[in-house]
Amino acid sequence: MAYSTPARTTTRRIRIHRIRIAGLLVVILAIAALGYRLLASSSSRAASPIDLRRSEHRDARGEALPSTVWPEYGQAAFVQTGQSQVQAGPNQHPAPIASGAKVMTAYLVLRDRPLRLGQGGPTITLTGADVADTDRRRRQEESVVSIVAGERLTERQALEALLLPSANNIAAVLARWDAGSVDRFVTRMNASARSLGMTHTRYTDPSGYDDATVSTAADQVRLVDRAMRLPVFASIVATPSATLPVAGTVHNTNTLLGHNGFVGVKTGSTAAAGGCFAFHAIRWIDGERTTITGVVLGQPGHDQIAAGLAAAAAMVDRIAGPSGRPAQRRPARSPPAISSSAWKRAARSRRS
């Protein structure tokens, strides 16, 4: 009995020591877990450029952008001269982009088969299968241009048919010509999107008629900005009209072209996508020539193309601010203002 008390005391001390160690370990683990969550949260914010850019919205003068810059409906984004980051408005989510998909189609074709300004490029001979495909699309009320078997289009003419009147049938023609099949071309569209950092984009067809072709305004701005660096692409989307062998004269659906500084790019509309417009505008702001490249998606209205054009025009005016004025290609002549009635005249009842 004389020796039992120290033994119990020693045992009790060991237990207390172990409890303290366990408690210390719990505290260390809790701190580590908290640190991990904070680090993960920080990494998540750093890997989410859209969220970061929302907190850094600035106009051409470096001032904070008011929420009224963005359209009331749908989604929008832009990038401007001197800024490397895309400014993204609220409601960014993958949504149908209609004929905005044709920007990627043209970009891929020109990247694979480059053209110089003034060059027509190789010829594409249209087949009976192309005519049958066109007839099918016409019955579905898609946007098409008339073709005949044996017709020969230069690469530039095909791109003009794709980008000006927004011909879905020529999107398919270009896809097969460039990649051997539409499926292989679509695979390459998605690979290109990934390489450009378009993480919220998925292409399922080269024309955008399929509502499963989705993207965000921010993703599309990245593509449009890259495509406008190709001189031939920029020259085509800045063209009011073109002449094709069978279809004759075709007109650009972008009736903002040449007005208020707009120099491109592409309209689009479907029931699911609403009115869409990828645009490139040049304004003089505080004495500096400023380029604004942007995209609006999901604009509602009976006249969807007009809605997309109107949303873009209002957005550019707000970004430029009261000091902004259109850049003039011909200093002696000021481009006339464009009214809402002009936008409406540009709209089509069919998908484009």
Image: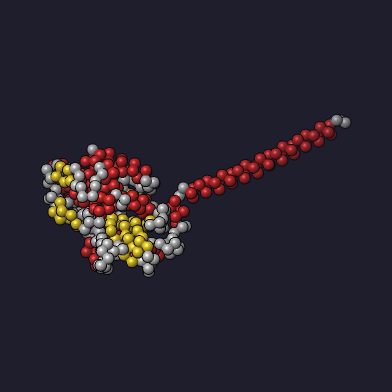
**Seen from this angle, which residue lies furthest right?**
2
**Seen from this angle, which residue lies furthest front?**
332
Quarter of the image where the C terminus is located: bottom left
Residue 314's quadrant in the figure? bottom left
**Front one among 80 and 216:** 80
Q: How is the image coloured?
A: secondary structure
Q: Position of residue 245 (x, y in %)?
A: 13, 50
Q: Position of residue 340 (x, y in %)?
A: 27, 67
Q: Is residue 6 above or below residue 276?
A: above
Residue depicted at x 81% and y 32%: 7
Q: Position of residue 91 (x, y in %)?
A: 40, 56
Residue depicted at x 31% and y 57%: 279
- In this image, 91 relative to 38: left or right? left
Q: Examine the rendering and report whether any part of residue 351 can be seen.
A: no
Quarter of the image where the N terminus is located: top right
Q: Examine the rendering and report whether any part of residue 243 can be seen.
A: yes
Residue depicted at x 55% and y 48%: 38
Residue 300's quadrant in the figure? bottom left
Total labels: the figure holds: 0
- In this image, 251 relative to 72: left or right? left
- In this image, 285 relative to 142: left or right? right
Residue depicted at x 26% and y 60%: 257
**Front one among 145 and 249:** 249
**Front one among 81 and 138:** 81
**Front one among 142 and 338:** 338
